[in-house]
Image (cartoon, helix red, strand yellow):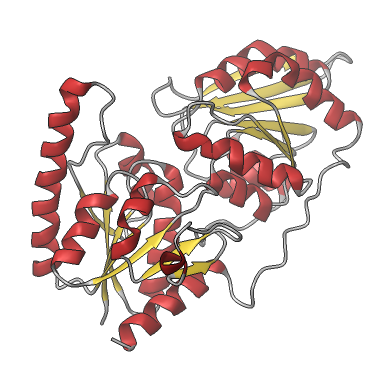
């Protein structure tokens, strides 16, 4: 039996693909241990996956405040020691790093213990941890057309789309809306700020849901786990119909949420975009302007060039309501919603095949 440690903490964009890979490897009789951060979002997302064992690492991201850099270094060193013990005691064969600040201690432990190392980048801009650890890796998975500047590193690269969790299956729209507590009929605009919410999008939803209700558009907004509990607000359309709007702190049933949606207004994280494409959803993307290395802007531009999305900069968010209404007036026909042709196997199968062959050929 092959044993894997999958480092996937910090954001839903790291954790979701990590869970997908773990599901596939466990289906192939592998043993998987998830290494996550101490962020609340990690433990909340994993509540529904009781088949996985996970361990929280104390690693912290690099602090912007110079006085907290020592705290970061200490947390990374403590995590490195913890990971070395884990790799040794659990007899880990391969460490799979999904990006982010939790990557460093686990990948370095694998390197020091001479174990196989796999890295995965979801975004169309290669993150700092992947760049720094790439020379230690045996295989690196990147999105299509994304490469390193180094030829030697590109020899390790395999291009693949983002692995998605098995639960991501489209269901009947009316059934999905009933599960969430939305009216089964009508049109739904879902506002999604990523796994941790987005203050700018939350504020926009609050300020504009009544105007959208006037056009017979219901709003479902996922505000992030730091916000208050579930809230239902009844609005009214211009022709007198009642409209039920839903504001959630978090949604652990993304299949129902996306199945219930007609138009998705969201940030431009790679995982959210991949799920929207799978569900054939038109998207209006509002990239987070402070995202590392502006990767959300690059993600958004890529899908907009394919006709799958409209990009609205956060500075132009006052125009967003008009754009949403105009999209529905055109019956959302200006969007490309057919999923792109994929390889013979799904992304998660391709990744698992590569990993298994690597270990078998050792």
Quadrant location of the C terminus in the rendered image: bottom left
Pinpoint residue 300: horizontal percent, then vertical percent.
64, 40
Pinpoint residue 328: horizontal percent, then vertical percent.
85, 31
Left or right? Give the position of 338 relative to 361. right
Pinpoint residue 54: horizontal percent, then vertical percent.
24, 55
Is residue 179 or residue 135 the one in the foreground? 135
Q: Residue at x 69, y 39 (%)?
A: 261
Left or right? Give the position of 78 relative to 207. left
Is residue 296 or residue 48 the one in the foreground? 296
Residue at the extreme bottom? 361
When asked about the image quadrant of residue 71, the answer is: top left
Q: Residue at x 13, y 69 (%)?
A: 113
Q: Is residue 255 above or below residue 352?
A: above
Is residue 249 or residue 99 the one in the foreground? 99
Q: Residue at x 36, y 37 (%)?
A: 41
When asked about the image quadrant of residue 242, the answer is: top right
Pinpoint residue 148: horizontal percent, then vertical percent.
47, 58
Quadrant location of the N terminus in the rendered image: bottom left
Query: Could you tell me if residue 49 is visible in this image?
Result: yes
In this rendering, the count of numbered labels is 0
Is residue 336 or residue 358 the one in the foreground? 358
Q: Is residue 72 above or below residue 14?
A: above
Q: Residue at x 41, y 65 (%)?
A: 153
Left or right? Give the position of 119 relative to 159. left
Q: Is residue 229 above or below residue 59?
A: above
Query: Could you tell me if residue 260 is visible in this image?
Result: no
């Amino acid at each position: 039996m092959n044993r894997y440690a999958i480092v996937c903490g910090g954001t839903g964009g790291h954790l979701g693909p990590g869970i997908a890979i773990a599901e596939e490897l466990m289906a192939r009789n592998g043993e998987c241990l998830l290494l996550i951060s101490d962020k609340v979002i990690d433990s909340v997302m994993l509540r529904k996956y009781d088949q996985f064992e996970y361990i929280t690492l104390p690693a912290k991201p690099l602090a912007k405040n110079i006085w907290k850099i020592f705290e970061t270094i200490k947390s990374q060193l403590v995590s490195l020691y913890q990971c070395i013990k884990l790799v040794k005691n659990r007899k880990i064969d391969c460490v799979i790093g999904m990006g982010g600040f939790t990557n460093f201690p686990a990948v370095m432990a694998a390197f020091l213990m001479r174990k196989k190392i796999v890295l995965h980048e979801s975004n169309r801009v290669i993150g700092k941890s992947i760049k720094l650890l790439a020379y230690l890796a045996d295989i690196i998975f990147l999105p299509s057309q994304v490469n390193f500047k180094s030829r030697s590193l590109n020899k390790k690269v395999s291009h693949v789309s983002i692995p998605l969790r098995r639960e991501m299956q489209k269901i009947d729209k009316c059934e999905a809306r009933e599960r969430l507590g939305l009216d089964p009929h009508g049109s739904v605009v879902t506002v999604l700020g990523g796994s941790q919410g987005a203050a700018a999008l939350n504020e926009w939803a609050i300020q504009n849901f009544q105007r959208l209700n006037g056009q017979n558009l219901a709003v479902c907004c996922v505000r992030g786990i730091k916000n208050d509990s579930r809230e239902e607000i009844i609005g009214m359309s211009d022709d007198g119909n009642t409209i039920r709007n839903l504001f959630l702190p978090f949604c652990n049933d993304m299949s129902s949420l996306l199945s219930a949606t007609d138009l998705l207004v969201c940030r431009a994280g790679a995982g959210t975009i991949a799920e929207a494409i799978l569900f054939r959803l038109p998207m209006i993307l509002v990239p987070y302007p402070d995202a590392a290395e502006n990767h959300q802007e690059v993600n958004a531009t890529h899908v907009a060039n394919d006709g799958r999305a409209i990009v609205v900069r956060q500075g132009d968010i006052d125009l967003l309501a008009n754009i949403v209404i105009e999209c529905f007036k055109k019956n959302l026909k200006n969007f490309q919603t057919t999923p792109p042709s994929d390889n013979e196997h799904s992304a998660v199968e391709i990744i698992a095949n590569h990993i298994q062959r690597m270990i078998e050929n050792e």
